[in-house]
């Protein structure tokens, strides 16, 4: 009996120590050192404000490379009073702090939640890899944040998002609402941003006078091109997405996303075929299509609308 009690007490002590230590960040002290040297070499000002290449999603990085301690602050200019995260070293170990409202470093709570830590690691990794710095974890460095599209979709659209977080504003960045009142060219600009570097191959021009009701579009992706006449269509945005798909595929594909719980009905940012395959492997093709419906190009015939044979 005494041996059993000792075993239980030892197990409880191990669990308590593990809980107190918290999860281990994927970001390493070496990565922070590399990034600090990067700032010193490439920027003259002490207060450095760097814009992410993923500016549609909002995060900015602010850091003073000569400060001691060296603290990296990640925040969103789209929501000045919104979430703030801090990354630094404490006793030689990486430490994340995070609050859903703006808060100074000293009062910002230390991150213990493993899912939130994964997201923050990925947030910094996006800046780190953009700077072409050494991958301290070699092939083990995973993009765990929102810019690994598959991981983002899995975490936020399949698995319910991060604990305690309201994802409405972030999902608005990734899912273009079908009821948007913005001009249609705003949707095409959003698609272009979603293609990252390949956005340079995507071009669109609007033709016609008299506003949206009389406008048509010429779309190009590389050597592929198509014309779109959204005026008079029952769902102009969905129609335009279908035309865009006809030239984006097989490189990328837009799909319709529905979520009654979140009240979202829109179009998901373009994913590459391997991204859709990864989601299908994780959840099955039927589960993926149930949430992300393929958008097909249609033509008007004497017998009504029918789907064209081309993608």
Image (cartoon, rainbow, N blue to C red):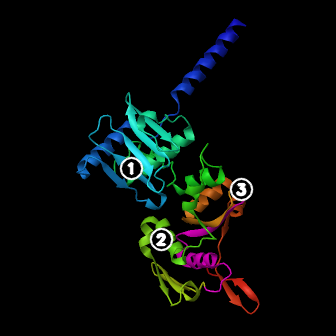
Q: Secondary structure at mark 3?
A: loop
Question: Of 172 and 310, which appears nearest the observer?
Answer: 172
- Counting residues from the start of the chain, the first of labels 2 and 3 encountered is 2
Q: Is residue 198 above or below residue 89?
A: below
Q: CA distance from mark 1 to mark 3?
A: 33 Å
Q: Secondary structure at mark 1?
A: strand
* Contact, mark 2 vs mark 1 (Cβ under 8 Å): no
Q: Position of residue 196 (x, y in %)?
A: 45, 65
Q: Which residue is mark 2?
A: 192
Res 131 visible: no
Density class for disc 2 (Cα within 10 Å; few <14, some 14-19, many ≥20) is: many
Residue 13, labelled with which disc? none
- Outermost residue, right direction? 303
- Counting residues from the start of the chain, the first of labels 2 and 1 encountered is 1
Look at 29% across and 38% down and name the residue there: 67
Q: Which residues are magenta?
A: 231-260
Look at 60% across and 83% down and name the residue there: 230
Residue 61, labelled with which disc? 1
Q: Is residue 278 above or below residue 218?
A: above
Q: CA distance from mark 2 to mark 3?
A: 29 Å
Image quarter in which the C terminus is found:
bottom right
Look at 24% across and 49% down and name the residue there: 41
Q: Which residue is mark 3?
A: 261
Look at 61% across and 76% down and name the residue there: 237
């Amino acid at each position: 009996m005494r041996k059993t009690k000792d075993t239980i007490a030892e197990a409880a002590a191990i669990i308590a120590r593990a809980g107190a230590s918290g999860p281990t960040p994927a970001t390493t002290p070496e990565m922070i050192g590399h990034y600090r040297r990067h700032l010193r070499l490439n920027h003259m000002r002490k207060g450095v404000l760097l814009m992410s290449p993923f500016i549609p999603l909002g995060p900015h990085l602010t850091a003073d490379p000569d400060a001691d301690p060296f603290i990296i602050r990640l925040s969103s200019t789209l929501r000045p009073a919104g979430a703030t995260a801090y990354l630094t070293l404490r006793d030689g170990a990486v430490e994340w702090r995070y609050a859903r409202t703006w808060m100074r470093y000293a009062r910002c709570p230390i991150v213990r939640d493993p899912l939130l830590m994964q997201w923050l690691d990925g947030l910094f990794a996006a800046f780190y890899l953009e700077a072409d710095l050494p991958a301290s974890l070699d092939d083990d460095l995973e993009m765990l944040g929102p810019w690994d599209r598959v991981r983002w979709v899995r975490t936020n659209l399949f698995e319910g998002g991060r604990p305690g977080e309201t994802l409405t504003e972030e999902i608005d960045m990734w899912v273009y609402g079908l009821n948007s009142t913005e001009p249609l060219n705003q949707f095409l600009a959003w698609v272009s941003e979603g293609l990252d570097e390949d956005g340079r191959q995507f071009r669109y021009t609007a033709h016609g006078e008299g506003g949206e009701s009389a406008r048509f579009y010429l779309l190009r992706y590389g050597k592929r091109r198509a014309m779109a006449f959204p005026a008079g269509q029952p769902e102009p945005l969905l129609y335009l997405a279908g035309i865009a798909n006809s030239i984006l595929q097989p490189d990328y594909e837009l799909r319709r996303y529905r979520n009654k719980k979140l009240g979202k009905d829109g179009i998901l940012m373009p994913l590459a075929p391997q991204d859709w395959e990864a989601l299908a492997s994780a959840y099955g093709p039927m589960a993926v299509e149930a949430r992300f419906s393929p958008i097909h190009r249609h033509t008007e015939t004497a017998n009504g609308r029918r789907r064209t044979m081309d993608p």
